[in-house]
Image: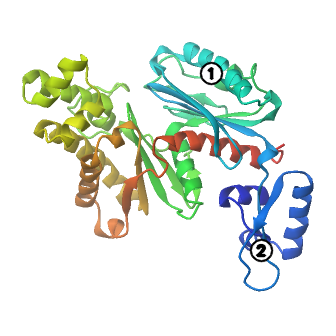
Protein backbone atom coordinates (compact mmCIF):
# COMPACT_ATOMS: atom_id res chain seq x y z
CA UNK A 1 0.00 0.00 0.00
CA UNK A 2 2.84 2.35 0.81
CA UNK A 3 4.60 1.59 -2.46
CA UNK A 4 1.40 2.13 -4.44
CA UNK A 5 0.85 5.47 -2.71
CA UNK A 6 4.44 6.49 -3.48
CA UNK A 7 3.87 5.67 -7.13
CA UNK A 8 0.59 7.55 -7.49
CA UNK A 9 1.79 10.63 -5.62
CA UNK A 10 5.17 10.74 -7.36
CA UNK A 11 6.83 10.95 -3.94
CA UNK A 12 5.85 12.41 -0.59
CA UNK A 13 6.93 12.81 3.02
CA UNK A 14 6.33 10.11 5.63
CA UNK A 15 3.59 12.09 7.36
CA UNK A 16 1.74 12.37 4.02
CA UNK A 17 1.80 8.59 3.64
CA UNK A 18 0.58 8.18 7.22
CA UNK A 19 -2.37 10.50 6.58
CA UNK A 20 -3.24 8.94 3.20
CA UNK A 21 -3.11 5.36 4.51
CA UNK A 22 -4.44 6.16 7.98
CA UNK A 23 -1.38 4.56 9.55
CA UNK A 24 0.30 5.76 12.72
CA UNK A 25 3.53 7.71 12.31
CA UNK A 26 5.51 4.91 13.97
CA UNK A 27 4.03 2.23 11.68
CA UNK A 28 4.69 4.37 8.61
CA UNK A 29 8.29 5.03 9.67
CA UNK A 30 8.90 1.33 10.31
CA UNK A 31 7.41 0.30 6.97
CA UNK A 32 9.35 2.99 5.11
CA UNK A 33 12.61 1.95 6.78
CA UNK A 34 12.06 -1.65 5.74
CA UNK A 35 11.25 -0.70 2.11
CA UNK A 36 14.30 1.58 1.95
CA UNK A 37 16.48 -1.26 3.23
CA UNK A 38 15.07 -3.56 0.56
CA UNK A 39 15.82 -1.00 -2.15
CA UNK A 40 12.17 -0.44 -3.00
CA UNK A 41 11.85 3.11 -1.67
CA UNK A 42 14.37 5.91 -2.02
CA UNK A 43 14.94 9.15 -0.10
CA UNK A 44 15.36 11.85 -2.72
CA UNK A 45 15.63 15.13 -0.88
CA UNK A 46 14.12 17.29 1.80
CA UNK A 47 10.89 19.25 1.62
CA UNK A 48 10.13 22.70 2.99
CA UNK A 49 9.98 22.72 6.78
CA UNK A 50 6.91 23.91 8.65
CA UNK A 51 8.79 23.71 11.92
CA UNK A 52 11.31 21.20 13.18
CA UNK A 53 13.27 18.78 11.05
CA UNK A 54 12.64 19.06 7.32
CA UNK A 55 10.87 15.91 6.03
CA UNK A 56 12.48 13.64 3.46
CA UNK A 57 10.67 12.91 0.22
CA UNK A 58 10.18 9.19 -0.39
CA UNK A 59 9.51 7.75 -3.84
CA UNK A 60 9.67 4.37 -5.55
CA UNK A 61 13.33 3.56 -6.12
CA UNK A 62 14.36 4.02 -9.74
CA UNK A 63 16.37 0.78 -9.61
CA UNK A 64 13.31 -1.31 -8.81
CA UNK A 65 13.10 -2.28 -12.48
CA UNK A 66 12.11 -1.16 -15.97
CA UNK A 67 8.57 -1.06 -17.31
CA UNK A 68 7.60 -1.77 -20.91
CA UNK A 69 4.60 0.03 -22.34
CA UNK A 70 3.09 -1.06 -25.65
CA UNK A 71 0.28 0.71 -27.49
CA UNK A 72 -1.06 -1.37 -30.38
CA UNK A 73 -3.23 0.96 -32.42
CA UNK A 74 -5.34 0.29 -35.48
CA UNK A 75 -2.65 1.83 -37.69
CA UNK A 76 0.42 2.12 -35.46
CA UNK A 77 2.67 0.34 -33.00
CA UNK A 78 4.27 2.33 -30.17
CA UNK A 79 6.70 0.95 -27.59
CA UNK A 80 8.37 2.67 -24.64
CA UNK A 81 10.86 1.63 -21.99
CA UNK A 82 9.93 3.48 -18.80
CA UNK A 83 11.43 4.10 -15.38
CA UNK A 84 9.24 3.57 -12.31
CA UNK A 85 8.35 7.28 -12.35
CA UNK A 86 7.19 6.75 -15.98
CA UNK A 87 9.92 8.91 -17.47
CA UNK A 88 10.94 7.55 -20.86
CA UNK A 89 14.21 5.68 -21.31
CA UNK A 90 13.62 4.96 -24.99
CA UNK A 91 10.77 4.62 -27.42
CA UNK A 92 9.96 3.37 -30.89
CA UNK A 93 7.02 4.02 -33.20
CA UNK A 94 6.13 2.59 -36.58
CA UNK A 95 3.08 2.17 -38.82
CA UNK A 96 1.18 -1.08 -38.43
CA UNK A 97 -2.05 -2.59 -39.71
CA UNK A 98 -3.83 -4.34 -36.88
CA UNK A 99 -6.27 -5.90 -39.37
CA UNK A 100 -3.40 -7.99 -40.75
CA UNK A 101 -3.83 -10.17 -37.68
CA UNK A 102 -1.71 -10.97 -34.63
CA UNK A 103 1.10 -12.89 -36.31
CA UNK A 104 2.96 -9.98 -37.98
CA UNK A 105 2.33 -7.55 -35.09
CA UNK A 106 3.52 -9.97 -32.40
CA UNK A 107 6.51 -10.98 -34.53
CA UNK A 108 7.55 -7.33 -34.61
CA UNK A 109 7.19 -7.06 -30.84
CA UNK A 110 9.30 -10.17 -30.26
CA UNK A 111 12.01 -8.60 -32.41
CA UNK A 112 11.76 -4.98 -31.26
CA UNK A 113 11.61 -5.50 -27.50
CA UNK A 114 14.90 -7.43 -27.09
CA UNK A 115 16.58 -4.97 -29.48
CA UNK A 116 15.42 -1.95 -27.49
CA UNK A 117 16.47 -3.52 -24.20
CA UNK A 118 19.94 -4.29 -25.60
CA UNK A 119 20.31 -0.76 -27.02
CA UNK A 120 19.78 0.70 -23.55
CA UNK A 121 21.81 -1.88 -21.66
CA UNK A 122 18.82 -3.37 -19.87
CA UNK A 123 18.94 -7.06 -18.96
CA UNK A 124 15.92 -9.26 -19.47
CA UNK A 125 15.62 -9.85 -15.73
CA UNK A 126 15.46 -6.10 -15.08
CA UNK A 127 12.01 -5.86 -16.69
CA UNK A 128 9.48 -5.42 -13.92
CA UNK A 129 6.26 -5.76 -15.96
CA UNK A 130 4.77 -5.18 -19.40
CA UNK A 131 1.56 -3.28 -20.13
CA UNK A 132 -0.14 -3.60 -23.52
CA UNK A 133 -3.09 -1.65 -24.90
CA UNK A 134 -5.21 -2.95 -27.79
CA UNK A 135 -8.14 -1.36 -29.69
CA UNK A 136 -10.81 -3.84 -28.72
CA UNK A 137 -12.73 -5.41 -25.80
CA UNK A 138 -10.46 -7.41 -23.48
CA UNK A 139 -11.12 -10.11 -20.91
CA UNK A 140 -8.64 -8.61 -18.46
CA UNK A 141 -8.39 -11.69 -16.23
CA UNK A 142 -6.91 -13.78 -19.05
CA UNK A 143 -5.45 -10.99 -21.18
CA UNK A 144 -7.35 -11.92 -24.34
CA UNK A 145 -9.43 -9.95 -26.82
CA UNK A 146 -13.07 -10.95 -27.27
CA UNK A 147 -14.56 -10.57 -30.78
CA UNK A 148 -12.84 -7.23 -31.50
CA UNK A 149 -14.59 -5.56 -34.50
CA UNK A 150 -11.42 -3.72 -35.65
CA UNK A 151 -9.10 -6.69 -35.12
CA UNK A 152 -10.06 -9.73 -37.20
CA UNK A 153 -8.06 -12.79 -36.23
CA UNK A 154 -7.29 -11.55 -32.70
CA UNK A 155 -10.25 -13.16 -30.92
CA UNK A 156 -8.95 -15.14 -27.90
CA UNK A 157 -5.35 -14.74 -29.09
CA UNK A 158 -2.92 -15.41 -26.20
CA UNK A 159 -0.85 -12.23 -26.28
CA UNK A 160 0.73 -12.92 -22.90
CA UNK A 161 1.85 -16.41 -23.90
CA UNK A 162 3.32 -15.05 -27.12
CA UNK A 163 5.75 -12.83 -25.19
CA UNK A 164 6.96 -15.41 -22.68
CA UNK A 165 9.87 -16.38 -24.91
CA UNK A 166 11.37 -12.89 -24.61
CA UNK A 167 10.52 -11.90 -21.02
CA UNK A 168 9.80 -13.59 -17.72
CA UNK A 169 8.05 -10.47 -16.45
CA UNK A 170 4.26 -10.49 -16.08
CA UNK A 171 2.34 -9.14 -19.07
CA UNK A 172 -0.95 -7.28 -18.65
CA UNK A 173 -3.32 -6.56 -21.54
CA UNK A 174 -6.21 -4.11 -21.54
CA UNK A 175 -8.33 -2.01 -23.87
CA UNK A 176 -6.37 0.98 -25.16
CA UNK A 177 -8.87 3.56 -23.86
CA UNK A 178 -8.76 2.02 -20.40
CA UNK A 179 -5.02 2.63 -20.48
CA UNK A 180 -5.59 6.22 -21.57
CA UNK A 181 -7.85 6.61 -18.53
CA UNK A 182 -5.09 5.22 -16.31
CA UNK A 183 -2.64 7.65 -17.92
CA UNK A 184 -4.92 10.59 -17.13
CA UNK A 185 -5.54 9.29 -13.59
CA UNK A 186 -1.78 9.11 -12.96
CA UNK A 187 -1.14 12.51 -14.53
CA UNK A 188 -3.79 14.05 -12.29
CA UNK A 189 -2.38 12.21 -9.22
CA UNK A 190 -5.85 10.76 -8.64
CA UNK A 191 -7.15 14.21 -7.70
CA UNK A 192 -10.03 13.85 -10.19
CA UNK A 193 -12.26 10.98 -9.12
CA UNK A 194 -15.02 10.71 -11.74
CA UNK A 195 -14.22 11.29 -15.40
CA UNK A 196 -14.38 9.86 -18.90
CA UNK A 197 -11.66 9.57 -21.54
CA UNK A 198 -12.84 9.37 -25.14
CA UNK A 199 -10.53 8.13 -27.88
CA UNK A 200 -11.47 9.07 -31.43
CA UNK A 201 -9.34 7.43 -34.08
CA UNK A 202 -10.11 4.56 -36.42
CA UNK A 203 -12.64 3.59 -33.76
CA UNK A 204 -14.27 5.32 -30.81
CA UNK A 205 -14.01 4.12 -27.23
CA UNK A 206 -14.41 5.37 -23.68
CA UNK A 207 -12.40 4.80 -20.51
CA UNK A 208 -14.36 5.24 -17.28
CA UNK A 209 -12.91 6.26 -13.93
CA UNK A 210 -15.37 6.02 -11.03
CA UNK A 211 -14.44 7.09 -7.48
CA UNK A 212 -10.77 7.15 -8.46
CA UNK A 213 -10.68 3.62 -9.93
CA UNK A 214 -10.85 2.29 -13.47
CA UNK A 215 -14.23 0.73 -14.19
CA UNK A 216 -14.23 -2.24 -16.58
CA UNK A 217 -17.75 -3.56 -16.02
CA UNK A 218 -18.94 -7.10 -15.36
CA UNK A 219 -17.09 -8.70 -18.28
CA UNK A 220 -14.55 -6.03 -19.26
CA UNK A 221 -16.50 -4.34 -22.04
CA UNK A 222 -17.55 -1.16 -20.22
CA UNK A 223 -17.00 1.95 -22.32
CA UNK A 224 -17.50 0.41 -25.76
CA UNK A 225 -19.48 3.49 -26.77
CA UNK A 226 -18.41 3.41 -30.42
CA UNK A 227 -21.28 1.04 -31.11
CA UNK A 228 -24.03 3.25 -29.72
CA UNK A 229 -26.42 3.98 -32.57
CA UNK A 230 -26.84 7.60 -33.71
CA UNK A 231 -28.72 6.84 -36.96
CA UNK A 232 -30.60 3.53 -37.50
CA UNK A 233 -30.37 4.08 -41.28
CA UNK A 234 -26.71 5.09 -41.20
CA UNK A 235 -23.54 3.48 -42.52
CA UNK A 236 -22.75 -0.19 -41.91
CA UNK A 237 -20.36 -0.65 -38.98
CA UNK A 238 -17.64 -3.29 -38.57
CA UNK A 239 -19.76 -4.79 -35.78
CA UNK A 240 -22.51 -5.63 -38.31
CA UNK A 241 -25.02 -2.99 -37.22
CA UNK A 242 -25.91 0.28 -38.89
CA UNK A 243 -25.49 3.82 -37.67
CA UNK A 244 -22.97 3.26 -34.88
CA UNK A 245 -21.23 6.50 -33.95
CA UNK A 246 -17.91 4.84 -34.85
CA UNK A 247 -19.12 4.22 -38.39
CA UNK A 248 -20.55 7.73 -38.66
CA UNK A 249 -17.94 9.94 -37.00
CA UNK A 250 -14.55 8.23 -36.57
CA UNK A 251 -11.54 8.71 -38.87
CA UNK A 252 -12.73 6.42 -41.72
CA UNK A 253 -16.07 8.25 -41.86
CA UNK A 254 -14.34 11.64 -41.90
CA UNK A 255 -12.09 10.47 -44.73
CA UNK A 256 -15.05 9.06 -46.69
CA UNK A 257 -16.92 12.36 -46.41
CA UNK A 258 -13.77 14.23 -47.39
CA UNK A 259 -13.28 12.08 -50.49
CA UNK A 260 -16.87 12.61 -51.54
CA UNK A 261 -16.53 16.37 -51.11
CA UNK A 262 -13.27 16.38 -53.07
CA UNK A 263 -14.53 14.25 -55.97
CA UNK A 264 -17.81 16.13 -56.24
CA UNK A 265 -15.98 19.44 -56.53
CA UNK A 266 -17.63 20.93 -53.43
CA UNK A 267 -14.24 21.24 -51.74
CA UNK A 268 -11.45 22.63 -53.94
CA UNK A 269 -9.04 22.44 -51.00
CA UNK A 270 -9.62 18.71 -50.46
CA UNK A 271 -9.60 18.09 -54.22
CA UNK A 272 -6.16 19.72 -54.41
CA UNK A 273 -4.85 17.61 -51.53
CA UNK A 274 -6.27 14.44 -53.10
CA UNK A 275 -4.61 15.27 -56.41
CA UNK A 276 -1.27 15.98 -54.73
CA UNK A 277 -1.17 12.94 -52.43
CA UNK A 278 -3.40 10.45 -54.20
CA UNK A 279 -5.28 9.88 -50.94
CA UNK A 280 -6.80 11.71 -47.99
CA UNK A 281 -6.69 11.20 -44.26
CA UNK A 282 -8.45 12.90 -41.37
CA UNK A 283 -5.58 15.36 -40.90
CA UNK A 284 -6.16 16.63 -44.46
CA UNK A 285 -9.75 17.45 -43.58
CA UNK A 286 -8.52 19.25 -40.49
CA UNK A 287 -5.95 21.23 -42.47
CA UNK A 288 -8.55 22.23 -45.07
CA UNK A 289 -10.86 23.38 -42.28
CA UNK A 290 -8.13 25.54 -40.76
CA UNK A 291 -7.58 27.06 -44.22
CA UNK A 292 -11.22 28.13 -44.29
CA UNK A 293 -12.78 25.36 -46.42
CA UNK A 294 -16.53 25.29 -45.72
CA UNK A 295 -17.03 21.63 -46.66
CA UNK A 296 -14.21 20.51 -44.37
CA UNK A 297 -15.73 22.62 -41.59
CA UNK A 298 -19.08 20.92 -42.09
CA UNK A 299 -17.50 17.44 -41.96
CA UNK A 300 -15.72 18.18 -38.69
CA UNK A 301 -18.78 19.79 -37.14
CA UNK A 302 -20.92 16.78 -38.10
CA UNK A 303 -18.45 14.34 -36.57
CA UNK A 304 -18.19 16.39 -33.38
CA UNK A 305 -21.96 16.78 -33.17
CA UNK A 306 -22.58 13.02 -33.41
CA UNK A 307 -19.91 12.21 -30.83
CA UNK A 308 -21.33 14.92 -28.58
CA UNK A 309 -24.77 13.34 -28.97
CA UNK A 310 -23.44 10.10 -27.49
CA UNK A 311 -21.47 11.91 -24.80
CA UNK A 312 -24.55 13.88 -23.76
CA UNK A 313 -26.28 10.60 -22.93
CA UNK A 314 -23.25 9.51 -20.92
CA UNK A 315 -23.15 12.83 -19.09
CA UNK A 316 -26.82 12.58 -18.16
CA UNK A 317 -26.29 9.00 -16.98
CA UNK A 318 -22.90 9.23 -15.25
CA UNK A 319 -22.44 12.93 -14.36
CA UNK A 320 -18.63 13.08 -14.71
CA UNK A 321 -16.66 16.16 -13.69
CA UNK A 322 -14.38 15.95 -16.73
CA UNK A 323 -14.33 14.47 -20.22
CA UNK A 324 -10.89 14.15 -21.83
CA UNK A 325 -10.74 13.78 -25.62
CA UNK A 326 -7.81 11.92 -27.19
CA UNK A 327 -6.88 9.84 -30.21
CA UNK A 328 -5.64 10.88 -33.63
CA UNK A 329 -8.83 12.64 -34.72
CA UNK A 330 -8.77 14.89 -31.65
CA UNK A 331 -5.79 16.71 -33.19
CA UNK A 332 -7.55 17.77 -36.41
CA UNK A 333 -8.40 21.20 -35.06
CA UNK A 334 -10.18 23.24 -32.38
CA UNK A 335 -13.50 23.12 -34.25
CA UNK A 336 -13.80 19.39 -33.51
CA UNK A 337 -13.61 19.91 -29.75
CA UNK A 338 -15.88 22.96 -29.97
CA UNK A 339 -18.53 20.95 -31.85
CA UNK A 340 -18.41 18.20 -29.20
CA UNK A 341 -18.81 20.75 -26.40
CA UNK A 342 -21.73 22.46 -28.13
CA UNK A 343 -23.56 19.18 -28.72
CA UNK A 344 -23.02 17.97 -25.15
CA UNK A 345 -24.29 21.20 -23.62
CA UNK A 346 -27.31 21.32 -25.94
CA UNK A 347 -28.40 17.78 -25.11
CA UNK A 348 -27.43 17.39 -21.43
CA UNK A 349 -29.25 18.49 -18.32
CA UNK A 350 -28.13 21.81 -16.89
CA UNK A 351 -27.14 20.34 -13.53
CA UNK A 352 -24.92 17.66 -15.10
CA UNK A 353 -22.99 20.22 -17.17
CA UNK A 354 -22.80 23.02 -14.59
CA UNK A 355 -19.19 22.21 -13.67
CA UNK A 356 -18.33 19.84 -16.52
CA UNK A 357 -15.00 20.37 -18.27
CA UNK A 358 -14.45 18.94 -21.76
CA UNK A 359 -10.83 19.20 -22.81
CA UNK A 360 -7.97 17.41 -24.56
CA UNK A 361 -6.21 14.48 -22.89
CA UNK A 362 -3.35 15.95 -20.80
CA UNK A 363 -0.58 13.70 -22.14
CA UNK A 364 -1.55 14.12 -25.80
CA UNK A 365 -0.61 11.24 -28.11
CA UNK A 366 1.41 9.60 -25.31
CA UNK A 367 -1.60 9.16 -23.01
CA UNK A 368 -2.11 5.49 -23.95
CA UNK A 369 1.59 4.64 -23.86
CA UNK A 370 2.04 6.17 -20.41
CA UNK A 371 -1.16 4.42 -19.36
CA UNK A 372 0.39 1.10 -20.39
CA UNK A 373 3.24 1.88 -18.01
CA UNK A 374 0.75 2.76 -15.26
CA UNK A 375 -1.00 -0.58 -15.77
CA UNK A 376 2.29 -2.48 -15.62
CA UNK A 377 3.50 -0.67 -12.49
CA UNK A 378 0.16 -0.82 -10.71
CA UNK A 379 -0.28 -4.54 -11.29
CA UNK A 380 3.33 -5.26 -10.33
CA UNK A 381 2.93 -3.36 -7.04
CA UNK A 382 -0.47 -4.84 -6.24
CA UNK A 383 0.96 -8.35 -6.72
CA UNK A 384 2.96 -7.74 -3.55
CA UNK A 385 6.24 -8.73 -5.23
CA UNK A 386 7.55 -5.74 -7.19
CA UNK A 387 11.16 -6.85 -7.28
Q: Residues within 10 Å of mark 2 (few under 14, many from 20)?
A: some
Callout 1: SS: helix
Pick the residue in front: 197 or 89: 89
Q: Which residue is mark 2?
A: 15
- Residue in the picture at 79% in, 70% down: 14
Which residue is at 59% across, 54% downward?
A: 186
Q: Can you give x and y, in whole percent of width and height, for residue 140 in the image? A: 62, 37
**In the displayed structure, would residue 114 be above or below residue 288?**
above
The front one of 117 and 344 is 117
**For residue 190, which quarter of the picture?**
bottom right
Residue 246: where, in percent of width, then height? 33, 35
Work out whether mark 1 precedes mark 2 in sequence or the reverse, and give the earlier one.
2
Q: From the image, which quarter does the C terminus lie in? A: top right
The residue positioned 82% from the left and 80% from the top of the image is: 53
Give coordinates of residue 109: x percent, y percent.
Answer: 62, 21
Q: Is residue 229 above or below residue 56?
A: above
What secondary structure is marked by label 2?
helix
Name the spot of residue 25 as percent of width and height, x first: 84, 75
Measure how far apart labels 1 and 2 are at the Cα level.
Answer: 43 Å
Q: Picture quarter containing residue 199?
A: top left
Q: What's the image's color scheme?
A: rainbow
The image quarter containing residue 3 is bottom right
Q: Residues within 10 Å of mark 1 (few under 14, many from 20)?
A: some
Q: In this rendering, is residue 136 above or below 42?
A: above
Return the residue at label 1.
109
Amino acid sequence: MLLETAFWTGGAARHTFAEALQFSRSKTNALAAGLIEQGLLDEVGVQHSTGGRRPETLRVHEDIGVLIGVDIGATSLDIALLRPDLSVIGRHSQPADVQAGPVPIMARLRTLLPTMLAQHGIAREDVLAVGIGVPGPVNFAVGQLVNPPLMPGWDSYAIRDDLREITDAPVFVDNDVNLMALGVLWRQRRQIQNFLVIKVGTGIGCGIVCHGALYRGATGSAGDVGHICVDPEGALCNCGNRGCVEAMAAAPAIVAMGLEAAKSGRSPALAARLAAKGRLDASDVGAASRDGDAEADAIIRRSGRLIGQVLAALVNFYNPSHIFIGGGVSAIGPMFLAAIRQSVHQRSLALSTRHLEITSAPLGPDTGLIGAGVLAMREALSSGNPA
